[in-house]
Amino acid sequence: MKDIVKLGVILLLVTALAGAALSVVNSITKPRIEEQKRLVTAQALAAALPEAAHGLIEPDTTCKTIQYYRGYRDSSKQQLVGYAYLAVENGYSSQIETMVGVDTTGKIVGIKILRQLETPGLGTKIEEIRYGETVPYFQLQFLDKLADQLAVDKDGGQIVSITGATISSRAVTNSIRNGFLKLQREIGALQKE
């Protein structure tokens, strides 16, 4: 019985020390992690709304249904160039987060995959850049298309899905379309061409 109490006290001390060490490490790394997330989001916003002036993309903090941003051409904030929103959908093996930029008519002007953990060599091709190119070929298909009309080819749409990664292709496509529909309901001002 004495040995059990002794082992219990030792285990308690070890777990308390480990918990304290994790707490210290978390407090040191949390600001760095948050700063890295902020930088990744800023880069994605710049890719999604290339027409917006540097630093003139503002988040909307009133919306509860979708996270979105407004981009402006100049510092007077009189010329709205479009909106950027975060599109999220479950892929084959992870959630895929995509930052999408649309102009005021609903046409996609930029897209950037923020996070995905899809199957290497298959689903990860949604971010693959072919030799000699500078932009992921899958994402290029979305540019200049109306966001509310997107569908993959296997569903009768114009977006050619990646062979062997239909679920990932469909997840990105559907998340962009569904996110746009939420955005459109929220702001109610986008005009169709």
Image: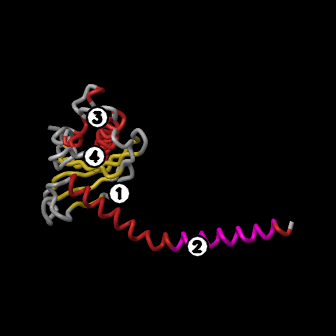
- Whether tag 1 and tag 2 are in contact, CB under 8 A, the answer is no
Q: Is residue 104 visible?
A: no
Give how far apart the Cα atoms at labels 1 and 2 are: 38 Å
Disc 1 residue crowd, few under 14, some 14–19, many 20+, Cα 10 Å: few
- Describe residue 96's horizontal placement relative to residue 151 as left or right: right
Give how far apart the Cα atoms at labels 1 and 4 are: 31 Å
Give how far apart the Cα atoms at labels 1 and 3 are: 37 Å
Please name the residue shown 23% across and 56% down the image.
70
* Circle on res. 127: 4
Q: Amino acid at mark 4?
A: Glu
Of helix, strand and loop, which one carries label 3? loop
| Mark nearer the N terminus (2 vs 4) | 2
Of helix, strand and loop, which one carries label 4? helix
Residue on which disc 3 sits: 162
* Circle on res. 62: 1
* Circle on res. 190: none
Image quadrant where one finds the C terminus: top left
Q: Amino acid at mark 2?
A: Ala
Of helix, strand and loop, which one carries label 2? helix
Please name the residue shown 34% across and 40% down the image.
123
Residue on which disc 2 sits: 20
